[in-house]
Structures are given as structure tokens and as C-alpha cells.
Amino acid sequence: MKSLLHAFEQALFALNNIPALIIVAMRGNSLAKKQGYTENTRCRPQIKD
């Protein structure tokens, strides 16, 4: 029972860290776009002529 509770706490800790990791990744992606790197073309807005 104690190990199950410990695993549950570990899972909650990981879930709490996921939003922070996403924010860091998004900031890194926007910083890369400012520097001219456009490797992730899915997030790039479509420019219509």
C-alpha cells in the first residue's frame, strides 16, 4: 500500500511538472523563431498573399 501511494505521489509530481516543461518548450520555440529558425512548420502561421 505504501509503495502504491508513493507511485501516486510520483505521478502527481510529474503531472505538475508537465505544464512547466510545455511553457519552457514554447518559450524556446518562440525564441528560435525570433532568431530565424523555422524548423517546426506546423506552428508557423500560414501567410496568404
Image: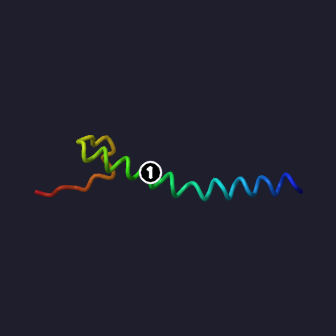
Q: Residues within 10 Å of mark 1 (few under 14, many from 20)?
A: few
Q: Quadrant of residue 46?
A: bottom left
Name, please, the residue furthest toward the left. 49
Name, please, the residue furthest toward the right. 1
Q: In what quadrant of the picture does the C terminus appear? A: bottom left
Amino acid type for the residue under numbered disc 1 = Val
- Residue 39: x %, y % from top left: 31, 40
- Residue 27: x %, y % from top left: 38, 52
Q: Tell me the residue at 33%/53% (across/down).
A: 43
Please indicate whether residue 35 sits to the left or right of residue 27 in the image. left
Residue indicated by mark 1: 24
- Residue 29: x %, y % from top left: 35, 48
Q: Quadrant of residue 40?
A: top left
Q: In what quadrant of the picture does the N terminus appear? A: bottom right
Q: Tell me the residue at 63%/53% (across/down).
A: 14
Q: 46 or 36: nearer the eye?
A: 36
Please indicate whether residue 10 sits to the left or right of residue 36 in the image. right
User: How is the rendered protein coloured?
Assistant: rainbow
Q: Tell me the residue at 27%/43% (across/down).
A: 38
Q: Tell me the residue at 23%/42% (across/down).
A: 36
Q: How many marks?
A: 1
Determine whether the residue tagged by mark 1 lies in a helix, strand or loop.
Answer: helix
Q: 20 or 42: nearer the eye?
A: 20
Q: Quadrant of residue 17?
A: bottom right
